[in-house]
Amino acid sequence: MNEKRNSFSSSIGFVLAAAGSAVGLGNIWRFPYLAAKDGGGLFLVIYIILALTFGFAMIVSETAIGRKTKQSALTAYGTLHKPSKWIGVFACLVPFLILPYYCVIGGWVLKYCVAFLTGGGAAAAEDGYFTGFITDLWPPIIFDVIFLLAVAVIIYLGVNKGIESLSKVLMPVLLVMVVGIAIFSLTIKGREGGLSAMDGLKVYLIPSLAGMGAKDVFIVVLDAMGQLFYSISVAMGIMVTYGSYFRDDSNLMKSVNQIELFDTVVAFLAGIMIIPAVYVFLGEEGMRSSGPGLMFMALPRVFAEMGVVGNVVGAVFFLMVLLAALTSAMSVLEAVVASLIDAFGWSRRKATIVESSLALAIGIVVCLGYNVLYFDVKLPNGSNAQILDIIDYISNNVLMPVVAIGTCILIGWLVGPKTVIDEATKNGERFGRKGLYIVMIKFIAPVMLFLLLLGSVGIIH
């Protein structure tokens, strides 16, 4: 048997690996930022509803496609329905584009982790620290290489010795750290007479429609749906690939439900972990910092405000983020490596080396985009961008919605929902939410995804 066709040894191995893929940088900084920006509890409620409907439909579909075909993304779609091979090409292109810049950001996290572990948290909180680091020539490249090398070694070891073994260790550790920091966050006291952590928690949990019209609510729905791509690792070939490793005698529906629960709980805790702390020290403006602004500038300031204990909390936080980034990057690299093995018959060694080398080359270009190759352009959605932002926009805003739409059309109309339902219940399991699944995959999800795509490319605002 081809090494690549090794299976996860147990359902829990699959669940932890898939959850590890889902719990990444997007969950840690993007979810809390969107929750703060989009009415707090309103975003949270809409996200949970979408996770149980749209997210459920996409996870089941992609996992079933993988298990039924025993192929990774590049070849699975064509195996299931030959004219749909193009979906697999796009689905493989997404992780190929994401991996280089994800490892660059992973390198940034590693840099901050080292800074806090060595007592340099105060310096990391100073204005200009982050900008000075990413605009420097060699340090970002060095940290990118270290992070990428760690990911490549894990994938080189394979499904059981690499991905599954590490996920079984890292995911419980990660969950404990998330819970611990979330609890600590709620105990934080700000300046005398100032804001409290509980005030921040209320902003996060209580839905607010103040000043919001129908269009604003619609934007919240699109934001929540876009976040699901990050949160559940769909439309990027990962769930198809992991599905191909899922044992035929394992309960697919039960595992999907566990992934849903794990992801939603961690995303929810990420908000508790970050929003109250940032709210106490930086107010609502600090909460609305997005992306690097939140993780690499706002949060170090929060840790600095905590005094001596802040350096310890900062070290634990960035170590946790590093583990989350590592488990996600593993799945991104595996999606490409598995596709190269299936499509071209390469060995795991060759596929890992080739893809990692390409990711390194593109990653160096991304690093140089902040100094030697710096330029600034405006994207169709109105945001300013450098090299990293352009690659992120193409992969996340264009290709991922297209892959998801293609998957819905394939399952909903070309091969039929029964294909997925039969695969998911092949051992006599019960397919919960069957009616919802059929309506979602055939009608609701394609329409919502099309609107998301229009919004992503700036056609609707």
Image (cartoon, rainbow, N blue to C red):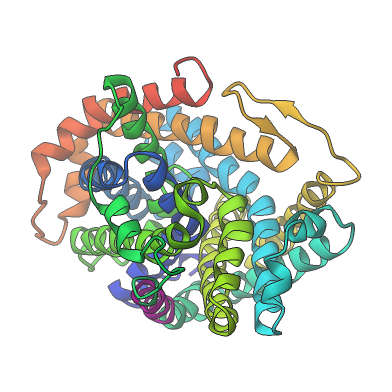
Q: Which residues are magenta?
A: 171-183
**Place of residue 392 in the rendered image (x, y in percent of width and height, measured from the top left):** 61, 40
- From what the image shows, is residue 39 above or below residue 271? above
- From what the image shows, is residue 343 above or below residue 187? above
The answer to if 356 sits in the magenta stretch is no
> Looking at the rendering, in which quadrant would you find the C terminus?
top left
**Place of residue 97 in the rendered image (x, y in percent of width and height, measured from the top left):** 64, 44
Q: Is residue 149 visible?
A: no
- From what the image shows, is residue 331 above or below residue 305? above
Q: Would residue 292 be found to the left or right of residue 287 on screen?
A: right
**Place of residue 354 in the rendered image (x, y in percent of width and height, measured from the top left):** 74, 58
Q: Nearer the viewer, residue 118 or 443?
A: 118
Query: Which residue is rendered at x = 11% and y = 51% of the image?
Result: 431
Query: Which residue is rendered at x = 53% and y = 75% of the image?
Result: 306
In which quadrant of the rendered view does residue 43 lie? top left
The answer to if 182 sits in the magenta stretch is yes
- From what the image shows, is residue 233 above or below residue 154? above
In which quadrant of the rendered view does residue 49 lie? top left
